[in-house]
Amino acid sequence: MLNKPDNQQNQTPKSDRNTSDSQIDSQNTNPKPYPWVRAAMNLSLVVLGSGMTLAGGYIASSQHQLGTNVSNLAVNQVKAEPLNPPANSNYVTSVVNKVGTAVVRIEASRTVKSSLPDELNDPRLRRFFGSEGGIPQQKRLERGTGSGFIISADGRILTNAHVVDGADKVQVILKDGRKFQGKVLGKDELTDVAVVQIQANNLPIVALGNSDQLQPGEWAIAIGNPLGLDNTVTTGIISATGRSSNLIGAGDKRVSYIQTDAAINPGNSGGPLLNARGEVIGMNTAIIQGAQGLGFAIPINTAQRISKQLIATGTVQHPYLGIQMQALTPELKENINSDPNSGLDVDTDKGVLVRRVVPNSPADQAGIRAGDIIEKLNGQIVTDADSVQQAVESSKIGTDLRMELRRNGQNVAIAVRPGAFPTQAQQ
């Protein structure tokens, strides 16, 4: 799901537009941060690899955090035999037989016009191409392959947004060899979820599980089309849940990821991650470049919530506050209080520090300030930025959120009304 074939062109993701409440758009202003702000920001810097448009995946490059050299992912991964398998020793076979026919291959293609070098645009060359002087542009076809899974018998399919992003043509290939022209009903870049429709009936469908109930150590099975090898099955466990997008180097996403050590490779993007009962618990989407056993999936509850909006309207609205924040620690508290230029007096080491407020954002209009410490949200104690982000994502646009803040030793209560996350055209 990660590396492009040689005939594809890498595209740099829009890293100048952060999309989670822990990394919010900062292109409208460029204030010089306080030293404590710079220190806090340095703690969360992770390099994001090239977005794999039409390639079925992207790489989250995390050399700083993992201490590994960034390199191309090896095709082979060393996998230990699972310990203490379920009582049914053929549980993987049972899952594959149950779900395999509902997993599809998605081939996306687009035509790209090649830009010519400046030397070839020399007016002196026009006489070779007629009086109009136009040097014909070259066109090439880019193709990519990903995976998906059928969620309705009448042909609705879930996949990653980056699998079909920019595609002129989407073809869906079933396990039995049937091919269908696909139509993208909608895609959401913030969560990397898309819905594709094909004209068919009585199709096999997957059963959806509950990703909110996942526990680390549970069995995980991935099915997809990695590196052009259709219907590949890999197994492992759920390594962790609730991995923030910023932590894995995907700061332009708004997802709390499932981490798994089931082998995931280029072409797996959009394919299902299953539990031992054959229920879809996630959508495979990313890996850490240069590492083994570090794969990430979008929780199925998130994908299902987004897909319902895409099917209904073709778009998704995300609640938005407009703050940058970080969990407060004793060390960060000491750094702030020892900085004579901070202008802050932090008397607690619990809560979430507001590092920056986006001008004219809902948070700005509600009176939230940089240096405020969020202690409670709607009466619930918060200890990390991810929990605040999840609370905001679960809220409704235009409905008040009650915040209890600590500001320079004083308690402050504020009601903030989330707005719709601004589109690129609005920024």
Image (tube, rainbow, N blue to C red):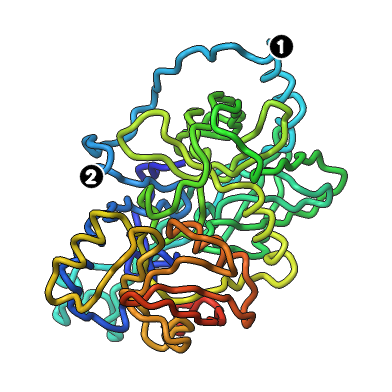
Residue under the point 46% across and 61% down? 111
Residue density around tag 2, few if under 14, some if 14–19, many if 20 or more, within 10 Å: some
Quickly name the residue at label 2.
Answer: 64
Q: Can residue 166 be seen in this view?
A: no
Note whether 62 is above or below 342 in the view shown.
above
Q: Which mark is residue 87?
A: 1
Note whether 66 is above or below 26 in the view shown.
above
Note whether 5 is above or below 334 in the view shown.
above
Residue 224 percent location from the top left of the image: 58, 34
Residue density around tag 1, few if under 14, some if 14–19, many if 20 or more, within 10 Å: few
In which quadrant of the rendered view does residue 289 lie? top left
Work out how far the residue at label 1 is from the one at label 2, CA to CA, in angstroms. Answer: 41 Å
* Amino acid type assigned to the residue bearing label 1 in the image: Ala
Note whether 351 is above or below 66 in the view shown.
below
> Is the Cβ of the residue at disc 1 closer than 8 Å to that at disc 2?
no
Judging depth in this view, the residue of 303 and 34 nearest the camera is 34
Residue under the point 62% across and 54% down? 302
Q: Which of marks 1 and 2 is nearer the N terminus?
A: 2
| Residue at disc 1, secondary structure | loop
* Amino acid type assigned to the residue bearing label 2 in the image: His
Q: In this view, does 232 lie to the left or right of 24?
A: right
Q: Residue 384 carries which label?
A: none
Q: Can residue 118 be seen in this view?
A: yes
Residue 26 percent location from the top left of the image: 32, 76
| Residue at disc 2, secondary structure | helix
Residue under the point 31% across and 55% down? 329
Residue under the point 57% across and 64% down? 391
In which quadrant of the rendered view does residue 140 lie? bottom left
